Image (cartoon, rainbow, N blue to C red):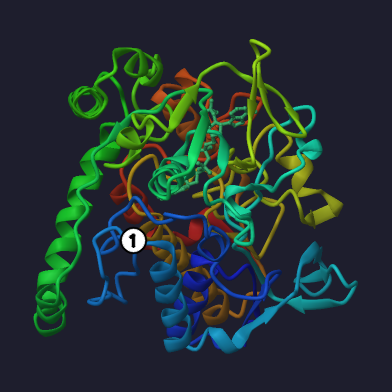
Amino acid sequence: MTSIGIIGSGFGGVAVAVEMLRGGHDDVRLWERGDDLGGVWRDNTYPGAGCDVPSPLYSFSYEPNPNWTRRYALQQEIHDYLRGVADKHGVTPRISYGREVTAATWNADDSTWTVTFADDSSETVDILVSAVGQLSEPVLPAIPGVDSFEGPSFHSARWDHDADIHGRTVAVVGSGASAVQLVPHLVRDGERVVVFQRSPNYLLPKPDMPYRRWHSALFHRVPVTQQAERGGIWTFMEQFARGMDAMSPVGKINRAVALRHMHSQVKDPQLRAKLTPDYPIGCKRILFSNEFYPALAEPTVEVVTEAVTEVRPAGVVDESGREHPADVVVYATGFDSQDFLDSIDVTGVDGEKLATRWADGAHAYLGMYVPGFPNLFVTYGPNTNLGGGSIIYMLEAQARHMRQVVDRLEAGSYDSVEVTASTDEAYDRELSEKLERSVWASCENWYRHPSGRITSNWPGATLPFARRTKTLEPSEFAWA
Ligand code: NAP
């Protein structure tokens, strides 16, 4: 029996575990550094946290949820859904909590991985799966004085629920996907909010709606109705992903809709000027909200477009030298998206370090396999993030492929498997050409490594990825 160790118990880790268990591979264990499963859906508890991908698609195909309370579910409901899937498929008892992996070393003698933990203990497995995610390491901005602020200050992914916010002035640094969700909640609760926006985003209306009791009843009794909704959303999102090119017809329509959305919700031309992006649509993640613009238009909100230069004990200073007094500072400044496996010291064949291999940006065959690192699978790895679409769909496709690799290892009594260098190089050339021509190369965004390489995103729609990963092609790998 092949032993499979999975680092992380977010959607990625659970997706792989379920697939392996469903495929009859029972020796599965998951190591989780936190005290609960859920990954980003455990960590992001800021007010208004939710998913801007509709829930019927942001769920496993084999676990539709007829009980979603709304089309765009909020964090708690998504977290509960993942817990339910993990329980139902027997994943939960296989998770060890408080197990932070610090290193993993390939043992050529017996084709295993030795995994070392923060407490210096270790375990050995045949197959090592990284499911650490792309957006799990919060980043505070490198601004002088961040530690000097006297009141509560925290990252959006580490929300301090003890901080007293009511009736206070809250400074929010950043205006990306998290800020768009949390700012309207702060404003609704009557707080004065100062939003520091470095770059504006394109914002599309969110076709959200509550599911009534009759929806759930229908989804329960006639499951094909929910499948039809999922299929419709998937088809729409595929077109959306194909339109990730500002010059494409879909890109032009998206831009027109986004600007009209702003015009209809923001009447003040000066504010509109601040909120109008000057880069091609799609280059940064397109956001969805019906509430963000109206919140910014409230008299209790100020949008500051001057760069933040300093944080002082009682406020935030912009580049004009103006100090904006604040009682609380929220850093909605995103994540270290280039981290991938950096926080783990991974050593492959002949002592090669993965960090060295990826020094100019991470890359992997299908986002999952790296030559020189046998029996290592990476889920939600390089170039598997989406500009539009459901990451759960991608995770399922990856898990299916990984399961086929394990099937073949067992069927052929092989000890190790490794993608061939030629397969990896050809794939990398193909992907790099597409990515260099993509809209993501046209502005600053978190998809790119400092070297310029676009390491996060899969270029295009999800169907080509699902097709490509559907059936394992044994000749692309070396089996030993
Ligand atoms: P983000 O989208 O990367 O936004 C970070 C924000 O902070 C940006 O506005 C950025 O400006 C700003 N910023 C960063 N450093 C700064 C500095 N030194 N000074 C001033 N501003 C600074 O981060 P996020 O909002 O946490 O979202 C990250 C990703 O998580 C999203 O893109 C998405 O993939 C995921 N997410 C998804 C959902 C969902 O609904 N599915 C919700 C939340 C998050 P620039 O734009 O100029 O860099």
Residue 243 pos. (x, y %): 26, 32
Quadrant in the picture for residue 42? bottom right
Q: Is residue 438 visible?
A: no
Q: Residue at x 69, y 39 (%)?
A: 140
Q: Quadrant of the N terminus?
A: bottom right
State the residue at coordinates (75%, 74%): 99
Compare residues 77 and 345 and report the one nearer the observer. Answer: 77
Q: Residue at x 80, y 75 (%)?
A: 110
Q: Which amino acid does label 1 sit on?
A: Tyr
Secondary structure state at the residue bearing disc 1: loop
Which percent across, then down, holds residue 223? Answer: 14, 78
Q: Position of residue 348 (x, y in %)?
A: 78, 56
* Label 1 near ligand 1 (CB < 8 Å): yes
Left/right placement of residue 222 relative to residue 294 reads: left
Task: Tell me the residue that label 1 is attached to.
Answer: 58
Q: Which residue is more in the foreground, 327 or 233?
A: 327
Query: Badge 1, how many Cα within 10 Å: few under 14, some, many 20+?
Result: many
Vertical side of 351 occupied by 415: above or below: below
Image location (x, y in percent) of residue 350: 85, 53
| Left or right of residue 420, residue 101 in this image | right
In the image as oriented, which residue stretches furthest toward the front?
167
| On-image quarter of the C terminus | bottom right
